Amino acid sequence: MGPSVLVKLSRVLTIGLIVGIAGCVNVNNTNVPVTNVQDPVTFVNLSGGTSAMSVQVNGSAVASGISFGSASAYANVPAGIEKYSFSYGGAPDTLAQRLDGQKVYTVVGVSDPSIGVTTRTYYFYSTRNTFDVTGVKDSILVRFVNMSLDTAATMLGGADFHLSIGSASDSTMAAGVLSTGSAGPFLVAASANPKYSILSSADGSSIVTATALNGTGGSRYTVILYGSGANIKTLVLKEN
């Protein structure tokens, strides 16, 4: 091995040593900043009643005044296992829940006193990665979530989610989506006036008749079915 090769090798080893030393960080050093990873989260109040929902994470308010059948604006919430408190004017419901970093979440609080479901339950749905393309140009991405707690015979087999474009007949996007289940997203052209409808998986009867999405190209939406009996409804959330 000649002198010039030894010099080059010495330089490579020196650079590698410097990089190795620079890459060693003492995680116990309080002077080293820690990245605060946060996820965008929207909170949905489907807990039957007249009281608005307020939400705290680790004791800090992140959303308030969320009326029944509506959703909050997106709030940045720390990733990891955190303490959530959901209040409706009385003693709060508290729970610990983990959020994975770099995700977008929808959190739904649901109950239905009209059919005897008085205990509120909370569901955390990850709808996409934060680094995903927000939408597709000239098209709409649609997700379906069945949050109806109805136990009537027509609902026991779940719900079928349909989309139609213009005057074309409905196309079944998802069949038999059970309570608290979800499906999608599905891609549909924004310019074709897409409509959604929801049918009973058990007997094919109509639950929600054809309803225009009124979406804009490049956007993502979630259609949430909730309520029961004659009070069954849908809520359309714009995800981006």
Image (tube, grey):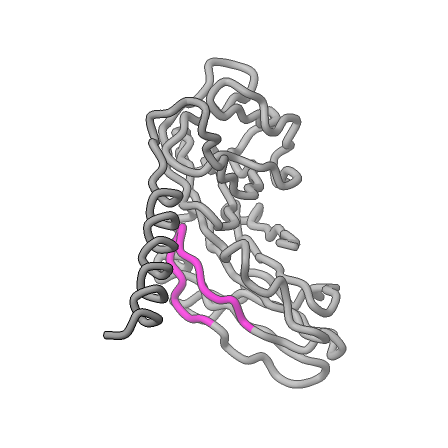
Residue 140: percent from left, percent from top: 65, 69
Q: Looking at the rendering, in which quadrant would you find the C terminus? A: bottom right
In the image as oriented, which residue stretches furthest toward the bottom?
A: 168
Front-most of residues 217 and 237: 217
Q: Is residue 173 left or right of residue 7?
A: right
In the image as oriented, which residue stretches furthest toward the front?
A: 3
Q: Main secondary structure of the magenta part?
A: strand
Q: Is residue 119 left or right of residue 192?
A: left
| Residue in view at x 54 percent, y 62 percent | 132
In the image as oriented, which residue stretches furthest toward the left?
A: 1
| Residue in view at x 61 percent, y 84 percent | 169
Which residues, given as a range, are shown in magenta? Answer: 174-186
| Residue in view at x 50 percent, y 18 percent | 59
> Where is 203 relative to 48, above or below?
below
- Residue 97: in magenta span: no
Q: Looking at the rendering, in which quadrant would you find the N terminus? A: bottom left
Front-most of residues 99 and 139: 99
Location of residue 211 by image quarter:
bottom right
Front-most of residues 196 and 129: 129
Residue 135: percent from left, percent from top: 63, 66
| Residue in view at x 55 percent, y 41 percent | 41
In the image as oriented, which residue stretches furthest toward the top?
A: 91
